[in-house]
């Protein structure tokens, strides 16, 4: 590796707090460290936008929070736009804006840090979770109507309904964790 590339690699590893792990192989790194290496690798070509698909999906809560902090640092210190796709409301709430997409359409735009600045602001985690439960329940009712009128097959209905119920259950568990 030429000197300039090695210098760049070390700078990027330092930026994500892993300069001390530069000589380690991937299987010697934790899941969170691997995610941070992925962030550094994504920055290697100095992109304007970083696309992150479920960056905390396989991580425990604490490690996930650490990865999100590094993504914030990338946004603020490197001036990069960071787009995060997530189903985790706690990750979403840490973003500047939340675009809720359903069936390929933007359903709402929320500003989680706004304090009552508009009807689309996500006032709290509880409100966000409750909204998602209401939306999933409404979607299940629409699906019930579609199977009754024959516009979808029973097989498609069963698959989609099961998926919706599982997603709703996850949000209900989140409400339970919040003490409600």
Image (cartoon, rainbow, N blue to C red):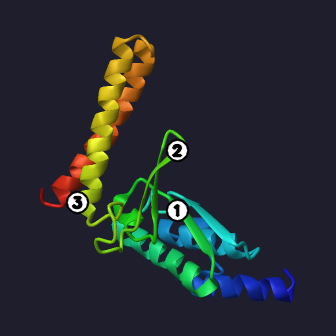
In this view of the protein, which residue sits in the foreground, 101 or 15? 101
Where is 97 relative to 133, above or below?
below
| Residue lying at 55% horizontally and 67% vertically, measured from the top left | 35
Please tell me whether mark 1 sits on a helix, a strand or a loop.
Answer: strand
Q: Which residue is mark 2?
A: 105
The answer to whether one can see residue 94 in this image is yes
Q: Which residue is mark 1?
A: 84
- What percent of the width, then of the height, locates residue 159? 41, 25
Of mark 2 and mark 3, the one earlier in the sequence is 2
- What percent of the width, then of the height, locates residue 45? 76, 74
Please tell me whether mark 2 sits on a helix, a strand or a loop.
Answer: strand
Residue 134 sits in quarter: top left
Where is 34 relative to 158, above or below?
below
The answer to whether one can see residue 170 in this image is no
In this view of the protein, which residue sits in the foreground, 84 or 10? 84
The tag on residue 126 is 3
- What percent of the width, then of the height, locates residue 1? 84, 80
Task: Tell us which disc is closer to us: 3 or 1.
Answer: 3
Please tell me whether mark 3 sits on a helix, a strand or a loop.
Answer: helix
């Amino acid at each position: 590796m030429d000197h300039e590339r090695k210098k760049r690699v070390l700078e990027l590893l330092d930026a994500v707090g892993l300069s001390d792990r530069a000589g380690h192989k991937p299987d010697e790194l934790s899941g969170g460290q691997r995610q941070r290496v992925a962030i550094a690798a994504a920055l290697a070509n100095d992109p304007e936008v970083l696309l992150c698909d479920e960056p905390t999906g396989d991580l425990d809560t604490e490690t996930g929070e650490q990865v999100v902090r590094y993504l914030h640092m990338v946004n603020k210190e490197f001036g990069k736009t960071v787009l995060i796709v997530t189903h985790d409301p706690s990750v979403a709430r840490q973003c500047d804006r939340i675009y809720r997409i359903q069936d390929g359409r933007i359903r709402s735009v929320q500003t989680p840090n706004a304090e009552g600045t508009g009807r689309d602001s996500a006032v709290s985690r509880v409100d966000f979770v409750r909204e998602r439960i209401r939306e999933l329940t409404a979607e299940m009712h629409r699906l019930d109507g579609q199977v009754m009128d024959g516009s979808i097959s029973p097989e498609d209905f069963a698959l989609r309904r099961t998926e919706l119920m599982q997603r709703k259950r996850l949000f209900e568990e989140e409400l339970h964790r919040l003490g409600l």
